[in-house]
Image: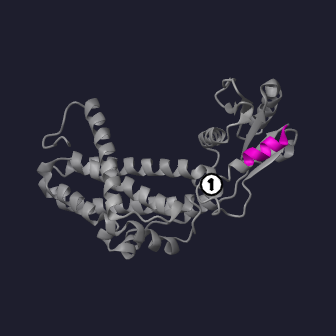
């Protein structure tokens, strides 16, 4: 889709009215995630786990994850998020600290290190031990999920400062924008069944969907720790995904200009095109890999399959189908 607007210049023209400074500010805003425990070495180990992940060498100098003793109340109250790490036998004490922090409006959760214990509260996280040794990968995954669920720190900031959050945040961004573009295509597609409305709405689709894809690409770059200057990073991103999407834009245009063809193909193409854009940018940000045209088409075919499944589920929920739609197979 980027190629259809003339590469970088088209992207910048499309985004001229969009102020990306709030995105950059949100991503670069400092925050403090504190792990507190009687076992300070364990807390330090968990804090260091937050720095393991994609492009771990790309992160601001700000130390976002720290470890302190459980008794360090003043430090805890200055944190944006606190993870209280405890053994099962000391859970009651951790609960008392948690209640004091919640009373002071400090977001916090309790992480219980155990081989067998199940969570006793919704805010609990169980950090699994395997033969007495912490399962680092699973502990990292559970902490990332629980901290994001608190919504105390913007996802872009979490990912930009702490590599452990990057893959999860980026995957969520791609899914969110792909679904949003599919929903937009569904809404305009219904109107395009009117032949007189097809041409102008198709032009609007190009602008809106491209804008969403370009902003998605910029968010991914921010989340992955790349330079935040929009004009510096977008030429590289345009080179990664620009040329490979021209044929896809042609497909979308044909669907939009042929009202009798139906809505479903257009929605699927909007979802899949956005999904592949995000995946291509993510892979480049993570590894420097530029997908070949063949790899891009394989990825697009996989995304299109997901889009078809999504649309079939949607149709099963709404059995009445608009006249002129076709079933994608």
User: Pointer 1: what residue?
Assistant: 163
Q: Position of residue 259 (x, y in %)?
A: 14, 52
Up-down relation of residue 72 to residue 270 (above or below): above
* Image point (65%, 57%), residue name: 161
* Image point (48%, 51%), residue name: 173
Q: Position of residue 163 (x, y in %)?
A: 62, 54
Give the residue at the far front of this rendering: 131
Q: Is residue 102 visible?
A: yes
Give the residue at the far right of this rendering: 71
Magenta highlight on residue 297: no
* Image point (83%, 47%), residue name: 75
Q: Position of residue 216 (x, y in %)?
A: 45, 58
Q: Nearer the viewer, residue 115 or 325?
A: 115
**Snapshot quadrant of residue 277:** bottom left
Q: Quadrant of the N terminus?
A: bottom left
Magenta highlight on residue 43: yes
Task: Please give the range of residues in magenta.
Answer: 39-47
Q: Residues within 10 Å of mark 1 (few under 14, many from 20)?
A: many
Q: Along the horizontal axis of the image, is 329 left or right of 86?
A: left
């Amino acid at each position: 889709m980027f190629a259809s607007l003339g590469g970088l210049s088209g992207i910048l023209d499309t985004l001229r009215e969009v102020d990306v400074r709030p995105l950059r500010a949100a991503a670069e805003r400092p925050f403090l995630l504190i792990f507190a425990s009687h076992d300070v070495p364990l807390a330090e180990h968990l804090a260091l786990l937050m720095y393991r992940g994609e492009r771990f060498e790309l992160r601001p100098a700000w130390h976002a994850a720290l470890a302190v003793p459980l008794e360090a109340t003043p430090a805890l109250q200055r944190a944006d998020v606190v993870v209280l790490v405890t053994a099962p036998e000391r859970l009651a004490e951790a609960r008392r600290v948690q209640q004091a922090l919640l009373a002071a409006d400090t977001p916090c959760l309790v992480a219980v290190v155990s081989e067998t214990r199940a969570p006793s509260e919704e805010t609990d996280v169980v950090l699994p031990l395997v033969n007495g040794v912490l399962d680092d990968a699973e502990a990292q995954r559970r902490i990332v999920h629980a901290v994001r669920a608190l919504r105390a720190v913007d996802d872009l900031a979490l990912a930009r400062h702490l590599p452990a959050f990057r893959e999860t945040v980026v995957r969520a961004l791609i899914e969110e924008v792909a679904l949003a573009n599919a929903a937009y295509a569904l809404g305009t597609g219904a109107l395009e069944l009117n032949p007189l409305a097809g041409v102008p709405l198709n032009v609007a689709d190009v602008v809106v969907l491209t804008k969403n894809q370009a902003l998605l690409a910029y968010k991914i770059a921010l989340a992955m720790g790349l330079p935040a200057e929009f004009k510096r990073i977008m030429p590289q991103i345009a080179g990664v995904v620009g040329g490979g999407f021209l044929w896809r834009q042609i497909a979308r245009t044909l669907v939009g200009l042929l009202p009798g063809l139906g809505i479903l193909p257009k929605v699927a193409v909007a979802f899949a095109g956005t999904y592949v854009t995000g995946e291509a940018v993510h892979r480049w940000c993570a590894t420097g890999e530029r997908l070949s045209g063949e790899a891009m088409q394989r990825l697009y075919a996989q995304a299109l399959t997901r889009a078809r499944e999504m649309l079939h589920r949607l149709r099963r929920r709404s059995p009445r189908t608009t006249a002129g739609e076709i079933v994608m197979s």
